[in-house]
Amino acid sequence: MSVRSAEPRTVGDIAPALLEDWLRERYFSASIDISSSGVQDYTLGDLRRRLGISTADLDAVAFRDSPSLGCEPLREAVAARTGRPAGEVMVTHGSSEALFLALAALIRPGDEIVVLRPVYQSLSSIAEVLGARLRTWTLHPADDFRPDLDRLRAVLTERTRAVLVNFPHNPTGVTLTPGQYAEFLEILRGHPGHLVWDAAFSDLTYDQPPLPDPGLGLERVISVGTLSKAYGLPGLRVGWCLAPAALLPAMTKIRDYLTISTSPLAEMLATAVLRQPESVLGPRLRQARENREALLAWARENTGRVSLPRPAGGVSAFPAFSGVDDVTGLCHRLEERGVLVVPGACFGHPDRMRIGFGGFPQSLRTGLDVLTGLLKRPPTPFEV
C-alpha cells in the first residue's frame, strides 16, 4: 500500500497520458496492431446490415442539440442493458468523458481516494489533479495480479471518499470471481464512500458470466460504460455514466463548459446497438475467445521465455519475459518490424508489455510470430 498526498494543482497540471502518448504517433502507421484494448472495429455498413438501419433512418436524423443527459431512447436502452433506472443515466462522449465528469463532480481537494495499481491512468490521474490523496490497492505480479480483498480492506479508512476500480482489469485481464464480487460488495456496503466502477470491458468475459452492475446491490455507485471496447465502435465515441440522480446536476454543470451534449447521429446508432446488443457483441466475443486461446497456446509454447497471467476478461494481456532486460526496447524493435504493442512502463511495470488480442486473428498470429523470433535471439548492437 502506498499513499500520495494531495498538492494544490490546476487541470493543466494533469500528468501526461503515457498510453496515449505512446499510441498517438504509432497507432495509425503500424502494419500489425496488437496493442489495442478493444475488439475489431465495425464499419457503418456492418452496423446497418446487422441492425437493419435503412437510408431513411439515417436521413431522418436532425442535427440539432441533444438533451444534456442524452436522448431518452438511448438512456432507456442503457437502463435496460444494465438494470439501473433511466433517470440515473448520462450519455457521454465515450467513457473518458464520463469518468472526468463524475470525478470532477465528486472529488474535492484533500479527499482520500483508493485506486488500483496497475491502473488505466485516467482513473488515477484525474483524481490526483483534482487534489485527491491517493491510496493504492495493489495487484501484485507474484499473484498473477489476482485481486486480494484483504489488501483493499487494509487501505480503506473512514476518510475514503471513493474507491475507483475497473474489472475486468486493464491491462492484465484479471477480474473478480463471483465469490470475490459478493465479498467486494459486502466490504463496501457499510462504507460511506462512493464506488466508481469502470465497466468498459464488462461484456468481455470468458470463464464466468459478466459481473452485474454493482449499483443493483449498493448505493452510491457510479458505473461507467462504453461502446468502444467490447462493441468495436471506438470511433462512435458513445459512453455513459450511471450515477445517483443527485450527482447528475453537478456533472451537467461541468459539461455545460465542455461538450454540452452528444451527437444525435451517434445517439441514434448507439440506441440501435443497445436494442440488439448480441448482434454486435456476439461475433466479436467469439473472435476474442478464439484469439485468447491462440495467445494462451503461444504462451505455453514459449514457457521459460514468457510468463503470462491468464486474462479472464477484456482483450489485453500483460506478459513478462525471461532474459529481456529492456522490454521498452523490445517494443521499439517490434515497432521497427511493423508490430505495435504497448510498453508495460505505461502502466508502471517496465518489465512487461500489453498485448491486445481483440483484433484480426491473422494480425495476432503474425505479431506473436515476430515477437517469438525476437525472444529467441539476442539483440545486435544496432538494435539496442
Image (cartoon, rainbow, N blue to C red):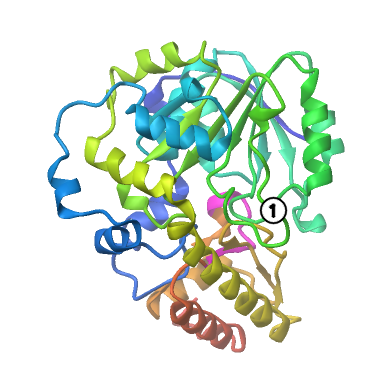
- The x, y position of residue 145, in whole percent, is 74, 53
- Nearest to the observer: residue 242 or residue 365: 242
Tell me where residue 117 sits by quadrant: top right
Q: SS at mark 1?
A: loop
Residue 367 colored magenta?
A: no
- Above or below, 179 relative to 97: below
Residue 119 at x, y = what percent? 60, 44
- Image height of 174 relative to 79, above or below: below
Residue at 54% across, 80% down: 368
Indicate the amino acid at tag 1: Pro
Q: Which segment is the magenta one?
A: 346-357
Relative height, residue 254 to residue 57 (above, below): above
Q: Which residue is mark 1?
A: 209
Q: For residue 86, say whether it is visible.
A: yes
State the count of labels: 1
Q: Examine the image and state in which quarter residue 355 appears.
A: bottom right
